[in-house]
Amino acid sequence: MSDTLSTCTNRVMAFFRYLDERDYPALTDVMTQDATWHRQGAVLQGHQQVHDALMRRPQHMRIHHLITNLVADRYDRDTCVMRAYMIVVRHQSDTALPGPAPLAGIESIRTTHIDLKRVDTQWFIQTMRNDEPSFLATA
C-alpha cells in the first residue's frame, strides 16, 4: 500500500475513533479548517460547526461506527477519494452504564464517502457524506 493510501486510511479510521471516544478536538484536527460534513440532515462547515453539533450528542449514548471495506476510488499527489461501509451500533440510556451496554444488534449500514486533501505535508478530511442506509434496524 502506498504511503498516501496508508495515511488517508489512518485519518479516516482515526476520525471515527475520535467520534466514538468523544475526542472532538482530535476529530477536528484531522479535518481541514473549512471541511464540510453532511451529518444527519445538516451541512456542517468548519471546525466550530462540527464541534457545536457534536456537543449536542446525548451524554449517555454509547456508539461505535465500524468502518469496513474502505477503498480509495482515486488518489493523486494532493487528493484522495475514499468510500467505506459504516456499520453503526448504538445504545442510549438516561444514566451512565457501569459496564457493557446491551447489544441489541446493528442499527444501520450505509456507505460513507470521504474526500481528503493534502495541505503541505499532512492529509486532512475535506468532505464527508453518507448515502441513505442500505440496511436499517426495525423496531
Image (spheres, grey):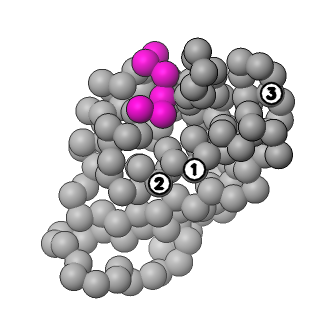
The answer for how far apart the CA atoms under marks 2 and 3 are is 23 Å
Residue beneath disc 2: 17
Q: Which residue is labeled 1 in the image?
A: 13
| Residue 19 x %, y % | 41, 49
- Return the mark for residue 114: none
Nearest to the observer: residue 106 or residue 80: 80
Residue tagged 3: 75
The reply to whether residue 127 is visible in this rendering is: no
Q: Position of residue 11 (x, y in %)?
A: 57, 41
Q: Indicate the secondary structure of the residue bearing disc 1.
A: helix
Dot 2: few (<14), some (14–19), or many (≥20) neighbours within 10 Å? some
Residue 56 lies in quadrant: top left
- Give the overall secondary structure of the magenta segment: strand
Q: Amino acid at mark 3?
A: Tyr
The reply to whether residue 14 is in sight is: yes
Element carrying mark 2: helix
* Amino acid type, mark 2: Arg
Q: Earlier in the sequence, mark 2 or mark 3?
A: 2
Element under disc 3? strand
Compared across the picture, whether 20 is left or right of 132 comes to left
Circles 2, 1 touching at the beta carbon (< 8 Å): yes
Determine the residue positioned at 52% across, 58% down. 65
Question: Which residue appears at 80% of the width and 27% of the height?
Answer: 75
Q: What x and y, as percent, mark residue 112?
A: 64, 44
Q: Is residue 80 left or right of residue 92?
A: right
Whether residue 110 sits left or right of residue 77 in the image: it is left
Q: Residues within 10 Å of mark 1 (few under 14, many from 20)?
A: some
Q: Which residues are magenta?
A: 29-35
